[in-house]
Amino acid sequence: MRSDYCGTLRSEHIGKTVSLYGWIDGWRDHGGVIFLDLRDYTGVVQIVSDPQRTPESYHLASSLRNEYVVRVEGRVSARPEHSLNPRLSTGTVEVYADTLEVLNRAETPPFAISKDEEVDEKLRLKFRYLDLRRGRMQKLLRLRHWVMQIVRRHLDERGFTEIETPVLVKSTPEGARDYLVPSRVNPGDWFALPQSPQLFKQLLMVAGFDRYYQIARCFRDEDLRADRQPEFTQLDIEMSFLSMEEIIALNEGLVAAILQETMGLELSLPLRRLTYAEAMVRYGSDKPDTRFGLELVEVSEVFRESSFQVLSGAVAAGGKVVCLPVPGAEGITNTRVKPGGDLFEFVTQFGARGLLFARVREGGQVDTIGAFSKSLTPEIAAGMIEKTGAQPGHLLLFGAGDGTAVPTVLNYLGRLRLKMGEELGLIDPNRHNLLWVTDFPMFEWNAEEKRLEALHHPFTAPRPEDEHDLKTARALAYDIIWNGVEVGGGSLRIYRRALQERVFETIGLTEEEARAKFGFLLDAFEYGTPPHGGIAYGFDRFVMLIAGEQSIREVIAFPKTQRAQDLMLGAPSAVADRQLKELNVRSTLLPKPQG
């Protein structure tokens, strides 16, 4: 039986006979003495075999290769002074192998296990079981486990009950596309995999559990990127009889506990707050990265009477002119900002029709090109400088649009702000800014479907003073943002049937559709539903930020590619016709070509 782990042996173990298990991490023959590095998840220890001291293991030791699985029994000894290794936690000791047993041999891996070197991600995902054997991935997955234990301990101490909710559920509108599962025993009917446990956690509040949480698996069929996966983990929390202030305070305590224990980061509580409107106007984003300045500035009044119709016309149409002042921009050439330049092309992909610019020179002179130049009177130039606080060397980048286009303008300037912050080295990677964004609009306009849809979800409660006009109402919602990444979002919930039916009507659901999709929830509201609210954290995203990684795939044991494929399993894949027949479904796709 194993007596110790490889990485735990220290000087105090000298003289102890140990039994170790692990993988061969390295092999060296130094003049007839064999040195092996034996690795398990705790670390590496040096194993020694020579013809005189350990003759029984010597012949076998010379035949071992990397990644062989072995058992070693021997005595812990002090390393000679000349061979001490301060880079290893076990660098003061070594184990002389009296007994050596090969438990399993190994082919040469497609990449080095023991070296922390760059490996093509497709190769890593195809051989994920080997990738996870590497020290870096071991640390990341154990960090994930650590965060889970902190969460469970923290919430348990505060009276929360962990409850699992179903994975086979009903397909409902709103949100991303569902993953659908045909029902064999109910031909023609389908389950959906849950995009979140939202409705179940509200029903648990109806049931009187008061404080619930779950580390839940969720599924969304959406286009993927670095911080998205088709199946992901959500920390789901719900509470009854608490105000928004109390819910926010409780969650600040949870986040502070996690970051203090895992990173040694002390948060200053309460966290800063921005309203949605303020975040959009100042940063062009509802998840602002506040580690640097470069705030947007509205300059509509400066251009209200301008002869340049692109700007004055936007103001006259109830819109805005917004400026991004960029300091120290002498190295950013006009070519980059003009049509065809990379900055121009960058903003057009987010809906910009152009990118106006001006430069501030010594003595307060402002210059630009084209028709914009002809409209820059001394009064307008002075107004621009005063409003933006620009100094010589500033590049002023402008966006403008009528009332309906203002969100687009703020969005592309907000994205440009981030790009400029990165390019100019203004973002400190060692800084951690967390804040809340509150007072979101209840709804946003879906131009494709020509209807309002819930900005978060249709179960979010409006501010009481806004209930008279739901179309323009602000939500009792709150997102927690970490360095420009939304790591969690929640709200107070609707708990009265009449108000919930009004919200369904606002997003275009008929009474019959609302009844068919959400009748169980509306009925539950008739049986004494308490006021309640909660939050859901993107658990993978949260761990990714703690680890300092750029992709959530690094903190998920078996992730999918950006094409939602599992390269290790070869999934998704075709299934036998008999399986489809049992499910009463048929594939109309042509078979994939072989080879």
Image: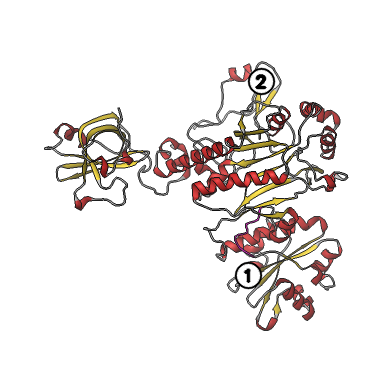
Image quadrant containing the N terminus: top left
Q: Amino acid at mark 2?
A: Ser
Q: Are marks 1 and 2 in contact (CB under 8 Å)?
A: no
Which residue is at 67% across, 77% downward?
Answer: 360
Q: Position of residue 82 (x, y in %)?
A: 20, 53
Which mark identifies residue 315? none
- Per the image, label 2 sits on a secondary structure element best described as loop
313 vs 224, left or right, is: right
Q: Position of residue 206 (x, y in %)?
A: 73, 29
CA distance separating discs 1 and 2:
59 Å
In the displayed orientation, state which residue is furthest to the left: 52
Is 290 in the magenta?
Answer: yes
Q: Do we see residue 225 in this rendering?
A: no
**Vertical arrangement, residue 475 with respect to residue 231, above or below:** below
Q: Position of residue 511 (x, y in %)?
A: 85, 30
Q: Amino acid at mark 1?
A: Thr
Q: Which residues are magenta?
A: 287-293
**Vertical arrangement, residue 192 with respect to residue 228, above or below:** above
287 vs 531, left or right, is: left
* Nearest-to-viewer mark from 1 and 2: 2
Report the residue marked by disc 1: 335
Q: Do we see residue 473 in this rendering?
A: yes
Q: Main secondary structure of the magenta part?
A: loop
Which residue is at 85% across, 34% downward?
Answer: 498
What crowding class fits label 2: few (fewer than 14 Cα within 10 Å), some (14-19), or many (20 or more)? some
Report the residue marked by disc 2: 183
Is 397 in the magenta?
Answer: no
